Image: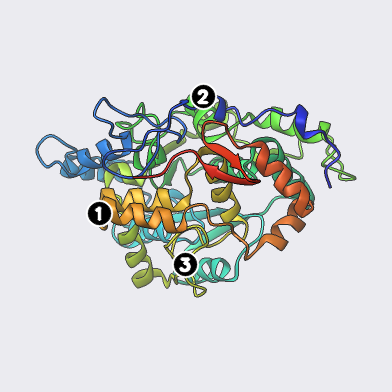
Amino acid sequence: MLNIDLNKLTVDPQQKKLPDKVIICKKCVMTNQRPRIEFDDAGVCSACRYAEKKKDAEKGIDWDARKKEFEELLNRHRRNDGYYDVIVPCSGGKDSSMIAHKLKYEYGMHPLCVTFSPPIYTEIGWRNLRMFIDNGFDHILVTPNGKINRALTKAGFVFLGDHNEIFDHGQMGAPFQISVKYNVPLVMYGENGEAEYGGTSVNNEKPGMPWQDFEKIYYSTGLDDFISMTKEAGFFMSEKVDGDVFQTYRLPQMDELKKVGVEMHWFAYYHQWTPQENYYYAVKNTGFMANPMGRTEGTYSKYAQLDDLTDSFLYYMMFIKYGFGRTTSDAAHEVRDGHINRDEAIALVRRYDGEFPARYFKEFLEYVDLTEEEFWMVVDRFRMPHIWQKTNEKWKLTYEVK
């Protein structure tokens, strides 16, 4: 239940930086309301320009040179005694499964895979993770204190319109904690989301995220500030939160990272990144299975981000906060990959984007301890006036993708 006055709260800090005029990319269907995305004078988004660069054989990325860089990186870290030589953050999904499998069986590395547990596992998500492990991988599952995680998840939803804010902290922190603890310096993530989906291009030519950029790109707010907000709201209830019981969500101290020599790299910096191809690879090599229930609510695909039962509410709130949802994100990438054309993407967006995730609504409300009325009060607080208008008691976008 909520015991706070929502009228006294502000929106997500990222929303305050949104352009007042909505622009749709001329090549895909992404909008300029995506945080940090860049548009050029031709009306094309930074993700499309990056996709062009990936495919340009003459003026674009030299993939042969990148592969050589990759092999040199692995050779620098490869061990001959069988001990772990690379950490792979791994949910059991198509992308991380592909990365871990290629590192082990194509490049001869010894990966240790690390998962930070989502709030509530789906059956297919748990099945895929177990199948991945059973296909030959050592694995560590990091699961936070359930009461504390629920309180922080609720706070993320109420204060930021993003219940996954604390999951993001844990998902980024846990692999590096394991890296330091096990003395395995190399940490291999998947893709640079800012480059692939749209965001700042400042790190497009870098093999990994610089430490100083973690806070401002990966998180909406600092962890200590977020914990303080949750405490002040009384969300922790009877759970004792003295001392640093939040360590599981933190990055190691900088001196610890430097002592071990931790390096964070994106696999996609060195290899062409195509989500659909990652799916086919994972099905063939790690036993990955698409959603047996069919497409995911809010989009048309059935093989992405299957592990978390609450995940669809992240994308629904993205639609509320920024005016575009999971379908826009999926379709825009598939246009860039050449799998569909822009007209097909527009049709998909109009059909599925913003679909309410009713399937697990009851479970989500129970997890964040909110009534249905409170849920909608929170949702409506994040509607920006240049994106939404209310007519006859119904909310409607102020623009149409075309």
Left or right of residue 3, residue 202 in this image:
left
Which amino acid type is marked by label 2? Lys
Name the mark nearer the viewer: 1 or 3.
1
Q: Are marks 1 and 2 in contact (CB under 8 Å)?
A: no
The answer to which of 384 and 190 lies nearer the viewer is 384
Question: Residue at left 74%, top 33%?
Answer: 227
Question: Residue at left 33%, top 31%?
Answer: 206
Residue 56 drawn at (x, y percent): 14, 41
Q: Residue 17 carries which label?
A: 2
Q: What element carries label 2?
A: helix
Q: Residue 341 carries which label?
A: 1
Q: Could you tell me how many numbered marks the image carries?
A: 3
Q: What element carries label 3?
A: loop
Q: Residue furthest bottom?
A: 292
Q: Which residue lies furthest to the front in this view?
A: 392
Residue 223 drawn at (x, y percent): 66, 32
Q: Residue 295 carries which label?
A: 3
